[in-house]
Image (cartoon, grey):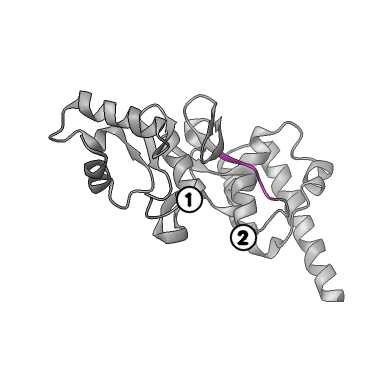
Amino acid sequence: MEFKRLIEIVGDEPVFETGLLLAGEDPADVNLQLSRSTKAGRLYQLRRGLYALAPPYQKMKPHPFVVANALRQPSYVSLQSALAHYGLIPEAVQMVTSVTTKRRAGWDTPLGSYGFRHVKTDLFRGYLLLDLAGGQPAFVATPEKALLDLVYLTPGADSWDYLRELRLQSLDRLDLGALEREADEANSPKLQRAAAVVAELARAEAQEYETL
């Protein structure tokens, strides 16, 4: 397989798996081209069997959330990464964090660092397919679920101290009713306590704006 043919097959895909190249092609030739192109810097290998074109060959820069979805399936972006995406915390997040029903894992790739936390199957919900930069779709937790995922996976995260230290902001973007329902559906006293604390923080933030 020639590299030109590889580019023709990959098309506009921000990331692609080896299987996309195998139809009508000799697997040995495909693997040889993947190895050569990666060593030459024309391809990024993100994990075994998952690649992205490197500049200047890529037609669009892969969105980090799209890469995260592709690295581990099923998964959706959540925790601090989703909270930062929605503007609910002020800090930039260096690692893209996701949740999955599979075991905990992490990858350092040429396109960034990615971490995956395990949740039970009955908690794997509360996410949307968002249209991101360049029309790239990715599964991302709702703001409410991202916050509750963080609380669920962090010891002591239902406390006033922890939630204040998060420096949550723009809490008017949260649907407090949805937050409470999600905590109730999880049947988790910890999440219910956290939802109550966040509601208090949201009311305090609203009152502060009213006095400005």
Q: Quadrant of the N terminus?
A: top left
Q: Residue 99 at what x, y percent from top left?
A: 53, 36
Q: Secondary structure at mark 1?
A: loop
Residue shown at the point (43%, 37%) measured from the top left: 41
Question: Outermost residue toward the left?
Answer: 24
Q: Nearer the viewer, residue 129 or 64?
A: 64
Asked where in the image residue 50 lies, by quadrant, the reply is top left
Q: Residue 142 at what x, y percent from top left?
A: 54, 52
Which dot marks residue 151?
Answer: none
Asked where in the image residue 170 lies, by quadrant, the reply is bottom right
- Sort mark 1 into few (<14), some (14-19) or many (20+) by Cα contacts within 10 Å: some
Q: Amino acid at mark 2?
A: Asp
Q: Nearer the viewer, residue 117 or 20?
A: 20
The answer for how far apart the CA atoms under marks 2 and 1 are is 26 Å
Which dot marks residue 63?
Answer: 1
Query: Could you tell whether 32 is left or right of 108 in the image?
Result: left
Q: Amino acid at mark 1?
A: His
Asked where in the image residue 194 lies, by quadrant, the reply is top right
Q: Earlier in the sequence, mark 2 or mark 1?
A: 1
Q: How many marks are shown on the rendered structure?
A: 2
Q: Is residue 136 above or below residue 27?
A: below
Q: Secondary structure at mark 2?
A: loop
Looking at the rendering, the stretch of residues picked out in magenta corresponds to 92-97
Q: Residue 34 at what x, y percent from top left?
A: 32, 31
- Sort mark 2 into few (<14), some (14-19) or many (20+) by Cα contacts within 10 Å: some
Query: Could you tell whether 34 is left or right of 158 in the image?
Result: left
Query: Could you tell whether 163 is left or right of 59 in the image?
Result: right
Question: Is residue 146 among what the camera can see?
Answer: yes
Residue shown at the point (82%, 69%) measured from the top left: 207
Which dot marks residue 175?
Answer: 2
Q: Residue 180 at what x, y percent from top left?
A: 63, 51
